[in-house]
Amino acid sequence: MSDPSRQPPQQDDDNFERDLQEMLEDGPSINEITSNVQGGTPNSVSAKFAEQVGPFSAGSSPGGAPASGSGGGAGGAAGAGGILYNSSGTRLTRSYTLPPGSIASLNINQNGTTSNVPLSNSGQHPISAGSAGNSPNGDFVPKSMSLSAQNKIETIKEWSMNTFKTTKQFLSERFGKATRTVDLELEASIEALRDTQKKYSNLLRLARAMTSHFHNVVYTQRLLGESFSELSQKSPELQEEFIYNCETQRTLVKNGEILLGALNFFISSVNTLCNKTIEDTLMTVKQYEAARLEYDAYRCDFETLESGPREAATQSKLQEGRKKFDDHKTKFERLRGDVQIKIKFLDENRIKVMHKQLLLFHNAISAYFSGNASALEATLKQFNIQLKRPNAEKPSWIES
């Protein structure tokens, strides 16, 4: 026997086609979908979405009475919330119309649930143009520039203008198209100072070369004395002669180390004078020369403005030029005074230092080559020079 609940295949196909036709008629049209995408605000949602939203129904009044949809089809029945079912129990979808503003306050999660999280500001937190990159209407608004950035820009602008003016003044002076401020006495002192530094640098180079050569001599004498001592033990017949020469070389090494200490002290003092004291004064001279170049550049600009026509438009530029000219003039005169004072004190200090160092150099050299060991040691005590023995132990951290 055949199963009475089983329908013929032809009848199943007819039911499937009919259900499919009802679903197509109930679904949104192509034009409606296109309008939703282009407009940005959906006018209809699916029945599943309407079921989750709750109070809205297709074409119903605020009271919630369902209205008959188009294309209800045979065998279709409306369930709770306006959901349609066909004769076989399959749920059919149907479009539901929502107000344009209500969808903006709904957020659909990935699992299909909704939450009343606003998708826009809704007027609660207005976006300020200074604190965000977008304005309420969607336009990009740049952040406000900080005060430190503005100061940096102004500094770079001022530096660029000064560099341009000083470069122009420098080239004009080189080609003879501009005048420069000259202090003959100060310029002569500066040239003499630079010449002194060159000569002292040469003296320092020669003293270092002499010390290096003499250090090699002392090292060779030490090795020679050790060789004499070793041979005195292996040659009994020449033991006395080898011992004499060994003692002589050891005495020369001792006196040579004292002389090396004096030479190193001399080199250290001259190096400090040449590469620190004089160099510090020359750095002030460089600042003075740069200030002089800026002063002449702004002086020429001010003279050009002052010799031009006196119009109302140029009065502000003239006042600004006068102010900058006065500022650079003050800076130039201050640095000129600093250079004069430093050169004066440098000459006094140089004479005192070199008087002491030249006396040390003469006494040490004379005492060594004359063989006067006591005079050599007295020279070191006179100038408070402490020798660093090669085998001497380092002082502890408490003593130092």
Image: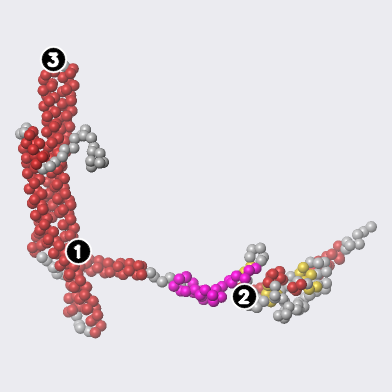
Look at the image and give the residue range highlighted in magenta: 114-138
**Viewer-proximal residue among 225 and 209:** 225
Q: Is residue 339 above or below residue 272?
A: below
**Residue at position x 12%, y 17% from top?**
238
Q: Which quadrant of the rendered structure holds the N terminus? A: bottom right
Query: What's the amino acid at mark 3?
Result: Glu
Q: Is residue 80 above or below residue 344?
A: below
**Residue at position x 46%, y 74% from top?**
129
**Residue at position x 16%, y 38% from top?**
387
**Viewer-proximal residue among 65 and 318:** 65
> Picture coordinates of residue 370 (x, y %)?
5, 34
Which numbered disc, 3 or 2, marks the residue that appears first in the sequence? 2
Which numbered disc, 1 or 2, marks the residue that appears first in the sequence? 2
Q: Nearer the viewer, mark 3 or mark 2?
A: 3
Considering the numbered disc 3 on the image, is that residue within a helix, a strand or a loop? Answer: helix
**Residue at position x 7%, y 44% from top?**
359
Q: Which quadrant of the rendered structure holds the C terminus? A: top left
386 relative position to 106: left or right: left
Query: What's the amino acid at mark 2?
Result: Thr
Q: CA distance from mark 3 to mark 1?
A: 78 Å
Query: What's the amino acid at mark 1?
Result: Ala
Considering the numbered disc 1 on the image, is that residue within a helix, a strand or a loop? Answer: helix
Quarter of the image for residue 70 reads bottom right
Q: Which mark is residue 237?
A: 3
Q: Which residue is denoted by mark 2 in the rendering?
A: 41
Q: Which mark is residue 290?
A: 1
Quarter of the image for residue 206 reads top left
Q: Nearer the viewer, mark 3 or mark 1?
A: 3
